[in-house]
Image (spheres, rainbow, N blue to C red):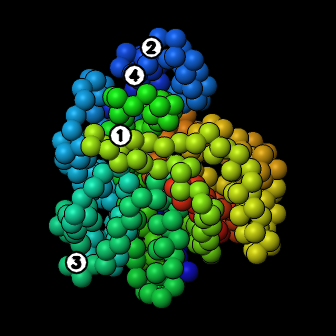
Amino acid sequence: MAHILSCSIHEAEFNYKQEEIQRLIENIFPMNESEIKKLIPIFTNSQISNRQLAFPLEWYTEERRLQDVNASYCEKVISYSKQAAMKCLRNRQFLQKEIQPEEIDHIIFVSSTGIATPTIDAYLLDELGLRNDTKRTPLFGLGCAGGTSAVGKAYDYLKGAPKSNVLIICVELCSITFQHNDSSVSNFVGSALFGDGASCLLLAGDESPLLQIKISTAPKVTSFSTKTKPHSQSVMGWSVKDSGFEVIFKKSIPKLVKSFWKEHIEERRRALHMDTTELPFIVAHPGGRKVVEAFVTSLGAEESVVSASRDVLHQHGNMSSPTVHFVLHQIMLQFPPSGVRSFMTSLGPGFTSEIVSLEWL
């Protein structure tokens, strides 16, 4: 099994009101005034109040080459990763003492908004002072599903290495993918939803000495399930152009939550003998307002089950893979009582549903 002992979040340094970003997009989006007016409700109905960006708003007014954007990505992501990881290892809200980087046996690095070879986790060995025999697993292309998928992969690894400790780091700079010459609705939706941020989780196996230093209840991962819809690769993702990553969003995503994801969660509910209508909360990635609403409808649960997801969407927007960890962080700080069961879930390119079951102990 895998125990999530600590969690940290790291916000990008430039915080803006949704209205400020809206005014910028109105000025630079490649559509005429009447077309933009038709799309503005996407901003106003998003239920997003603030978003954090890696660069000041002025930075986004200039069109840049992929080479230059990617260089900026690498620099920022290494910095954000280091800050998120050190916060996690030193988080005295969850840990009785600080964890030393040398105690980490495996690092899983998740990001889909830039490219690096060697991957960013190779740089983090030096930046964090990890052992040179630390295992590395970089995950690219999972998008919003990456945060939950990484927890599942850490769970699978720790079943075979129960004395080990795993650090999961998710960092995304979604804002840098905005395309100046892309007049698609997907590009507009991305400009209304995306923010930047990072997260880090510390997981320990059943026989890890670190289990003795948790302060209070913490979630134990009890199962992991992935389900991918056949022939659905065009639902969401990136189209890679000379100018960078063009976002792909199909308007069918909320409907897929009510059909494809609902089937998946029902399968997990039956397998684990759980009543989803009685869950106190779910750790759900808030991809957007309609996605959050579709989770509630599919579960047949009270609105309160996604209150943490709504709050994260309101305060940060959609940061892709780290977003679900922002939700988890908020819930972990409430220290649910021992025995509480829940799910962590995210949806991503594929079209893929990731579900991890959790139990607080």
In the picture of the structure, the residue carrying the numbered disc 2 is 32
Q: Quadrant of the N terminus?
A: bottom right
Q: Residue at x 53, y 71 (%)?
A: 152
From the top left corner, tell me how far across and down residue 229 is, in percent: 63, 62
Sequence-first tag of 2 and 3: 2
Q: Which mark is residue 29?
A: 4
Establish if 310 lies above or below 42: below
From the top left corner, tell me how far across and down residue 40 is, in percent: 54, 19
Q: CA distance from mark 3 to mark 4?
A: 47 Å
In the picture of the structure, the residue carrying the numbered disc 1 is 177
Report whether residue 145 is seen. Answer: yes
User: Could you classify mark 2 by the number of other residues whose Cα lies within 10 Å: few (under 14), some (14-19), or many (20 or more)?
Assistant: few
Element marked by disc 3: loop
Q: CA distance from mark 3 to mark 1?
A: 34 Å
Question: Is there CB contact under 8 Å for labels 3 and 1?
Answer: no
Kind of residue at disc 4? Phe
Direction top: furthest residue: 33
Question: Is there CB contact under 8 Å for labels 4 and 2?
Answer: no
User: Could you classify mark 1 by the number of other residues whose Cα lies within 10 Å: few (under 14), some (14-19), or many (20 or more)?
Assistant: many
Sequence-first tag of 2 and 1: 2
